[in-house]
Image (cartoon, rainbow, N blue to C red):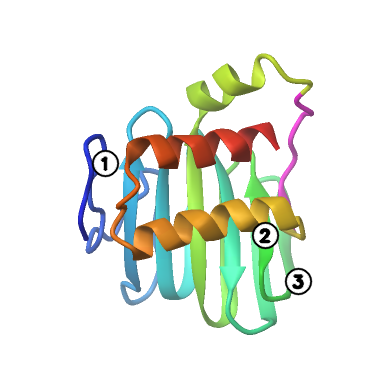
Amino acid sequence: MATKAGTHDVAGDRNCCASCSASAAVPEHAGVNLPGIATVVRYRDLPALDCHGDKLGVGLHLGPTGWMEWRTAEQDARRLPVPSDSLSLVPAGISYWWRRDQPSELVLVELESSFVAGVARNTDAPVLRAMPVFQDRAIAHILSALREEIRDGCRSGHRYGTALCTALVIH
C-alpha cells in the first residue's frame, strides 16, 4: 500500500489499532494511521473484534445481512440483526466485543479523544452512547470514502483523511 507523509501502512499487523484485536485467524486488512487524529482500518473476512481503549470507534459493516453478538463491559451479550451498510458506534473508554455469524468486511475508524474534543469544542455535541447497530447515510458515505482511499493506496494524502475524520466528528 502506498503511503503519504504522516501515514503508515498497517497491513499485516494483527493489532494495528492500538485498542483492538481481531480474533481467530488474522483477517486480511489494510489501513492508515493519521497521527493525533485517527486510525482507519479496512478488515476483510473478519469474524470477531475485541476493543478496549480510549478512542471513539465508528464501524461500517459491509457484506450480506447477518447477525452479530455484541457485548460491552456494562451490558450482557445481545444478538442483533446487522443489515448491510449499517454502522456501530462506541464512545471512548468503553470496552466492547462483537462477533458476526459469518465473516464480513468492516471499515473501522478509531478517533483520538483529543482530536474529537478539539473538533467538538465549537459544536453542540451530544453525549455519545454505544450504538451496536444503526443507520446514517452521511456517516456511511464518509466511511465509504475512507474505505476507497485505503483501497486506492491513500493517494489523496493526510489532508484528505483529516478532512473526512473532521466531517465524521462534526456530523
Helix or strand or loop: what does disc 1 sit on? loop
Q: Quadrant of the C terminus?
A: top right
Q: Is residue 157 left or right of residue 164?
A: left
Q: Residue 129 colored magenta?
A: yes
Helix or strand or loop: what does disc 3 sit on? strand
The reply to whether dot 1 and dot 3 touch (C-beta < 8 Å) is no
Magenta span dominant secondary structure? loop
Picture residue at 34% right of the left edge, 67% below the top: 29
Going from the N terminus, do you reach mark 2 or mark 1 first?
1
Q: Is residue 104 above or below residue 160?
A: below
Q: Nearer the viewer, mark 3 or mark 2?
A: 2
Helix or strand or loop: what does disc 2 sit on? strand
Give the percent coordinates (x, y) of residue 97: 56, 59
The amino acid marked with disc number 1 is Thr
Q: Nearer the viewer, mark 2 or mark 1?
A: 1
Going from the N terminus, do you reach mark 3 or mark 2 first?
3
Residue underneath mark 2: 87
Picture residue at 22% right of the left edge, 64% below the top: 12
CA separation in Å, label 3 and label 2: 12 Å
- Magenta part of the chain: 125-132
The amino acid marked with disc number 2 is Leu
CA separation in Å, label 1 and label 3: 35 Å
Q: Nearer the viewer, mark 1 or mark 3?
A: 1
Residue underneath mark 3: 80
In the displayed orientation, state which residue is furthest to the top. 122
Q: Is residue 156 left or right of residue 168?
A: left
Picture disc at residue 7: 1
In the displayed orientation, state which residue is furthest to the front. 156
In which image quadrant can residue 100 be found?
bottom right
